[in-house]
Image: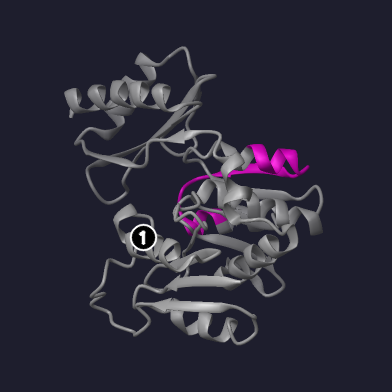
Amino acid sequence: MKIVVDSANGMGAQYFDELFKLVDADVTRMFWEYDGSFPNHEADPFKEENTEAIRAKVVEVGADLGITTDGDGDRIFFIDDKGHLVTPAVLRGLLAQIVLRDHPGSTICYDIRPGKITRDMIVEAGGIPSVTRVGHSLIKEQMRKEQAVFGGESSGHFFYAFPTGVYEGPVTVATQILQEVTRRGIRLSEIVEPLERYVHSGEINFTVEDKDGMMHKLTQIFSDGELTTLDGITITYPDFWFNVRGSNTESKLRLNLEAIDRKTMESRRDEIVAVIKEGA
């Protein structure tokens, strides 16, 4: 297997060096030297611009897949053989199904930000989906409370109920995905492309002083949708669904929206953006 890994000059290089001593793979290492100034790109793969280099390198060398991590190495992302980022919601669902093979009927936790494919895949695999508030400490707390075997956050944190506790497992994630690609005997792109059933807006941030007032206004405008107030507001319709939640430290609102197709996503996104900007 040919693999490209970008540690973003961060801590992921440390455990990948140990992992690849045990894996028969042709590994291309990118930005491997520790450097807290992050000279090549910001160590945040959640931002598309920070995966440009690895996406291009995967295609250039004809790799089977790419792996990239954030600065402290606890968040992990994958690039398929066509140079496309595997969305965290799809990756989370795939990992959930892998875990459920060994723990049938178990609870899987995931945060409330739109990523409906995760729920679809948990249910399809016979698991019990459990929605949590955003934040790694909150997901881990709910996992312990509900005795969940796996949990995933939209930002790229993935958690396991290890014998020693509930915490992030990026090496376990990498190992399970490499095993799954090998087991199926097909390209990573062939695994994930059928799972890209929905279109996501990405997270959009707004400066809003009266955060609660704006969320109340949105609930009035979209009052015919199904409302959930677990973390901010989540409003669901048959063809689109969105979450708006406030920052705990800033005067900001964060919008995440998902829909059944791009046209619906763009039109509904623009509609909600206009409402928020008008009242900001």
Image height of 173 relative to 225, above or below: below
- The magenta segment: 120-139
Q: Quadrant of the C terminus?
A: top left
State the image coordinates of residue 53 (x, y, percent, origin top left). 33, 64
Which quadrant would residue 120 be assigned to in this image?
Answer: top right
Q: Is residue 90 magenta?
A: no
Q: How many marks?
A: 1
Q: Amino acid at mark 1?
A: Thr
Residue at (64% x, 51% y) in the render:
94
The answer to whether residue 128 shows anywhere in this view is yes
Query: Dot 1 surroundings within 10 Å: few (below 14), some, or many (20 or more)?
Result: many
State the image coordinates of residue 119 (x, y, percent, origin top left). 63, 39
State the image coordinates of residue 19 (x, y, percent, origin top left). 59, 81
Q: Quadrant of the N terminus?
A: bottom right
Q: Is residue 131 magenta?
A: yes
Residue at the extreme top = 224
The answer to whether residue 236 shows anywhere in this view is no
Viewer-side residue, 220 vs 46:
46
88 relative to 276 in the view: left or right: right
Disc 1 secondary structure class: helix
The residue at which mark 1 appears reads as 51
Residue at (51% x, 20% y) in the render:
239
Image height of 80 relative to 112, above or below: below
Which quadrant would residue 152 be assigned to in this image?
Answer: bottom right
Image height of 14 relative to 111, above or below: below
212 relative to 76 in the view: left or right: left
